Image (cartoon, rainbow, N blue to C red):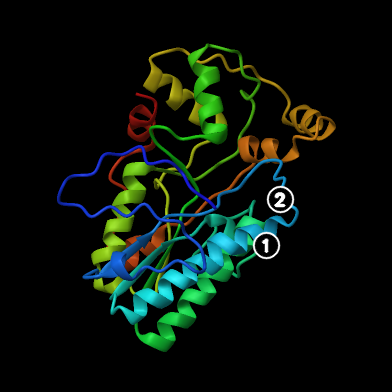
Amino acid sequence: MTTRSATASFPASMRHFPIEITSETDWTAALEGIDVIVHLAARVHIMNDRAADPLAEFRRINTAATLNLAEQAARADVKRFVFTSSIKVNGEENDRPFRHDDTPMPIDPYGISKLETEIGLHEIAARTGMEVVVIRPPLVYGPGARGNFALLVGLVRKKIPLPFGSLKNRRTLVALPNLVDLIITGMKHPGAAGETLLAGDGEDLSTPGLIEGIAAGLGVKPILLPFPPALLQMGARVTGKDAVYQRLCGSLQVDISQARDVLGWSPIVTPREGLKLAVK
C-alpha cells in the first residue's frame, strides 16, 4: 500500500476521499459529478531504492493505477484529465533546452513509468474522447519541499560554506505557485486538450544563483567558495554520489514556449519571489 498522511485541512464544502491508489481501486463514488481530474499522486524518485524490481513498483503505482483511474473517469463522462508527469520523460541532462516535442529519453524507472502513463492516457483519449493534458515539471520548490532543495536550504540557513562558487550550470526550476497556475490553465483552457506542456519559471538559475536566492529569502549571506567543478565531480564519483552531483551541479533547461504560445500562459512569480515564499 502506498500512502501519505494528509496534512491539509479541507473546507466543509469539499468532498475528501482518503483512498488507496492501485490498479484495482474503485473510483465510482469519487468520480460522481466530476468534470476535470488533476492527477498529482505518484511513487516518486527514491534514492537507494530497496525494491527488488524498482521499475515494476513504479509501473504498479504510476502507470497501472493511473490508467485504471483514467479508464473509470472516461466511463464516468469526465471531460478532461490533467496528468502531472515529469521532465524526466525527456531525459536527465541536456546541451539545449528540452522541448515538448523532443523524442522522450527517460533513463530511470520513474521517468520510464511516467512516459508509459502518458502513452496510455493518449490511447484512452483517442478511444473515448476524454481530453488529456500532460504537464511535465522539473524540480518543484515551495514550502515543505524535500530532497536536495531542503538540504540546500538547511545548509544555507546554518551559514555553512558551500563549494559551488565556480559553477556555471543552468537549471530550470518551477515555483509551486507557477506550477499550480499552469495546472489551473491546463484545466480550463480549450486549447490545452491533447497538449504536452513543460513547466518552468521562465528564468533559469545556476546553482550559485539558486543558493543566493535561498539566502535572500532567509535574510542571510551565503558563503560560496570557488572550487574547480572537475574536482567536485571527481569527489562525487569516488564517494558514489554521481547522481547527487548531477542534480546539484549539472545543467537541465526547459523550453516553456509551448505553454506561452498555445495557452498564453506565463509564470506568475519570479524565481526570487518563489524562493522567498518557499523558505518562509
Res 107 seen here = no
Please report the residue visible at 75 percent of the width from the left and 34 percent of the height from the top.
241
Q: Is residue 209 above or below residue 48?
A: above
Residue 220 percent across, percent down from the top left: 43, 12
Please report the residue visible at 68 percent of the width from the left and 60 percent of the height from the top.
55
Please report the residue visible at 58 percent of the width from the left and 48 percent of the height from the top.
252
Image quadrant containing the C terminus: top left
Specify the farthest residue to the right. 238
Q: CA distance from mark 2 to mark 1?
A: 9 Å
Question: How crowded is the residue under tag 2: few (<14 C-alpha within 10 Å), some, or many (20+)?
Answer: few
Specify the farthest residue to the left. 13
Question: How crowded is the residue under tag 1: few (<14 C-alpha within 10 Å), some, or many (20+)?
Answer: some
Secondary structure at badge 1 equals helix
Provide the residue designation for mark 2.
Answer: 51
Residue 154 percent across, percent down from the top left: 52, 20
Specify whether 27 is left or right of 227.
left
Q: Nearer the viewer, residue 186 or 76?
A: 76
Residue 119 percent across, percent down from the top left: 53, 75
Residue 80's tag is none
Specify the farthest residue to the bottom. 127
Residue 56's tag is 1
Type of residue at label 1?
Ala
Task: Locate residue 219: give its quadrant.
Answer: top left
